[in-house]
Amino acid sequence: MNRFARWIVKHRVAVVIICLLMLIPSVLGMNATKVKYDLLYYLPEDLDTVKGQNILMEEFGKGAFSLCITEGMSETDQQALEDAIRDVPHVDTVIGYASITKGTIPSEILPDEYRNIFEKGDARLMAVFFDDTSSAEGTMEAIAQIRKIAGQQCFVSGLSAVVTDTKQLVEDQEAIYVAIAVALCCVVLMLTMDSILLPFIFLLCIGVSILWNMGTNYFLGEISYITKAVAAVLQLGVTLDYSIFLWHSYKEEQQTYSDKDEAMASAICKTISSIVGSSLTTVAGFVAICFMSFTLGRDLGIVMSKGVILGVLGTVILLPCVIRLLDRALEKTSHKPLLPSVAGISKFVTKHYKVLFVVLIVLCIPAFYGYNNVGKYYDMSACLPQELESVKANTKLSETFDVSTNHLVLVDADVPQKDVVAMTDEMAEVDGVKQVLSIDSLLGAGIPESIVPDEILSELKSDEYQLMLISSEYIISSDAVNRQIDELNEILKKYDDGGMLIGEAPCTKDLISCTDHDFEVVSLISIIAIFLIIALVLRSISLPVILVAVIETAIAANLCIPYYTNVTLPFVAPILISTIQLGSTVDYAILMTTRYLQNRRAGSDKREAVSKAVASSAQSILVSGIGFFAATFGVGLYSNVDIISSMCSLMARGALCSVVVVLFLLPAVLLVLDKVIIHDAESEREELTLLVERMEKSDEKACFCSYHCALHDADLLCQRGNRETRACLCRDECRRRRADRH
């Protein structure tokens, strides 16, 4: 490793050039990566609702659909508009009052229930089907074209319109998200670091690793808009620490080495062991998200795991080179850090630790209750600004036609007409159902098949399936609509066991079931993974339990606030935030605990050990937490896409919650459970004793690390043995233990 570090420093100009040249394919890959804006796309493929959507595409050539409301149009203008929309690229079918009658069905013989589907006063409704999915580029282009053709007299509702507006909104704001995060991080770093230039160097190198990460997304094919929007900000927040570690290590090594290249090489070696260990818990948290059945988690988990790894590489490869190239400029712009002293924290926590421990226990009760009962919403339009065209259209549809959502039904084409008519009659009686539209029910109303336009018959009936449309007055994801879907499915299966109920509301109902299960699974996996990592690092069973419990308390404190303030969160927020906060901030607890163990093993009593641990780690924890807060807080305030705003706000608040819990409550736990922790550590002590005894009995001419050295993370000291010894048998073991602790 030392040879690698020396090579990096020696060839710093070439390394910087290579790293910058790598930005070319990264930018190209980033621009070529497709973005999905329909979150329902990430539902498991084995669900009936997803299978039904695939059948809709295969049998009818239809993917997405929208309901368009027009106002104040004559019948002639309405017919002209329908014809114009039908000619828009990627529009497959237009079904409206004018297209059904089309001069062949006298309006007087059309049943009132069908007239009411399409007409209310001067408002008229038409269903527009597209030849691709809701988030396909062609569909979104068609939505924009329809709006352009229809003007102010037409409102385009539905998931496709929502996806179109979401895309435009996020694309307009993405660059601003990054700018806000960078600006706030700069302010924090200027206050906490010792050079004005240093924050810009940090952010430059982190920015390069972010672009590397975004570029490699090309190999994934596509990512979600949520991943694209928050990945850069999140990577900045969780990897900023690594740059700070390297800088502090470099400054320390300059006290040992007069040659700055040697100092930097040594700093690289020490930083690698530190940040690799630190990054393991963060990566574990993101990997846990990949186990979600709702594959949005896998999307974000893979991207962020790559981001952390590439952030580590950027820190140990690019950053040292840039620092050495700009060393003189850094010296000229140096200043004293402006972070206030935190010396008083250690005195406070050791003096009042019993009270703080009781506070922790009392806090857990309301925190975990609120955490487990926080409200979630699943309607994607609810996370968008109310002034968007799609939101206005959905509101207009509800107010004018008393319709909030629409279901599609796929029925076997061989089901007899009389059964379809009977089924539609039953479905029409279900609470909240406004209308049921089908070809067979239309024919069953006494209209001869011969006078129904052929294009209508062919569009709603294939060789395998008949397509039906059900309008519902209930909003998506509500308990009422979910009960309605269950009842409709029961009726459907009675007449056609292979029939399928599809659409946004049924998909959302499946989404609720998937994510509720995912929350439990992902939380468990992340806890187990991080527990094992801590157990390996600290060589203890009790400490992983303590540290995970402490950070879980911070997570509960973070996520219970929406419950007690009556704020409803987007459905993915609790799942993602709980895992991200655990993986990203448990390092604070590990740092504090490591310092405490070092002090105890050095002979300090528990109060002194905790006091020293708090004093030595408080500044690092504060800088890290404030940096994470700065990277996400501003985006949370600025974004008017609630799903992005909520996630960033929760991450910002979660970082502060973890800082407070680790600085004030963890020391109290360490003091109260000191006997348990130290007893648990005896197994390591006994292991080391046996190691030394075994080596002392060896016939090899070897020098032995002192028991004190191996136990206390000191430098390798040879206190016994022959000076002519060529090897130290316990050297590797000692180094391994040092690396594990770091």
Image: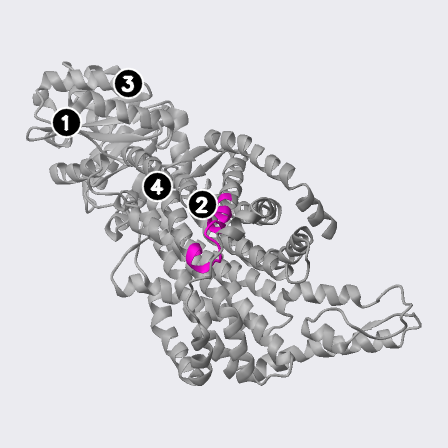
Of circles 3 and 2, the one toward us is 2
CA gap, disc 3 to disc 4?
Answer: 34 Å
Q: Secondary structure at mark 1?
A: helix
Q: Residue at x 78, y 63 (%)?
A: 732
CA gap, disc 2 to disc 1?
Answer: 37 Å
Of labels 3 and 2, earlier in sequence is 3
Judging by the rendered image, the residue that carries numbered circle 3 is 88
Q: Secondary structure at mark 2?
A: helix
Of labels 1 and 3, earlier in sequence is 3
Of circles 4 and 1, the one toward us is 4
Judging by the rendered image, the residue that carries numbered circle 4 is 176
The magenta-colored residue range is 189-204
In the depicted structure, whether residue 93 falls above or below residue 679:
above
* Direction from residue 354 to residue 561 in the image, left or right: left
Judging by the rendered image, the residue that carries numbered circle 1 is 152
* Direction from residue 466 to residue 358 in the image, left or right: right
Q: Secondary structure at mark 4?
A: helix
Q: Residue at x 42, y 80 (%)?
A: 348
**Foreground of the two, 161 or 265:** 265
Q: Amino acid at mark 2?
A: Ala
Of labels 4 and 2, earlier in sequence is 4
Q: Amino acid at mark 4?
A: Ile
Asked if the stretch drawn in magenta spans residue 203, the answer is: yes
* Direction from residue 119 to residue 433 in the image, left or right: right
Judging by the rendered image, the residue that carries numbered circle 2 is 231
Q: For the stretch drawn in magenta, what is the main secondary structure? A: helix
Q: Are marks 1 and 3 in contact (CB under 8 Å)?
A: no
**What x and y, as percent, mark residue 617?**
52, 69
Q: Amino acid at mark 3?
A: Val
